[in-house]
Image (tube, helix red, strand yellow):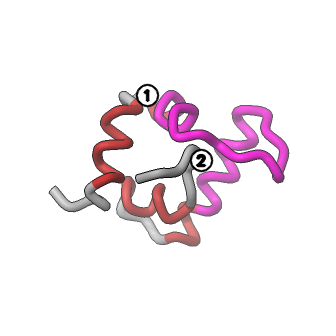
Amino acid sequence: MNHLFITPNDIAILTGKSVKTSRRYLSLIKDALGKEDHQGITIFEYASYEGVDYQEVIKFLGTKGEI
């Protein structure tokens, strides 16, 4: 994994939800964090919002969800 910002595809991998649902969820997170539409959400911000360790998120995404 080599990107700073979380994408709807990443959220879909993490949650098992569809990309469309993940896109809506990312929008909700942006609203909660006071971000504008053009601003991204970092993996650290996503992990903090979810209450999980960001290193676990990075590790899980690095394996593309395969355990």
- The CA span between labels 2 and 1 is 17 Å
Residue 36 belongs to the span the image colors magenta: yes
| Image: 9 above or below 27 | below
Q: Amino acid at mark 1?
A: Gly
Residue furthest left as drawn: 67
Which region is colored magenta?
23-49
Q: Identify the residue shown where x is 20% and y is 61%.
A: 66
Q: Position of residue 47 (x, y in %)?
A: 47, 34
On the image, numbered disc 2 is attached to which residue?
A: 5
Name the dominant secondary structure of the magenta segment.
Answer: helix
Q: Nearer the viewer, residue 28 or 54?
A: 54
Q: Of residues 54 and 1, which is closer to you in this image?
A: 1
Residue drawn at x 79%, y 33% is: 34
**Which quadrant of the structure image shows residue 24?**
bottom right
Q: Which residue is mark 1?
A: 51
Q: Earlier in the sequence, mark 2 or mark 1?
A: 2
Q: Label 2 is placed on what type of residue?
A: Phe
Q: Residue at x 58, y 71 (%)?
A: 20
How packed is label 1: few (under 14 Cα within 10 Å), some, or many (20 or more)? few
Q: Position of residue 22 (x, y in %)?
A: 54, 61
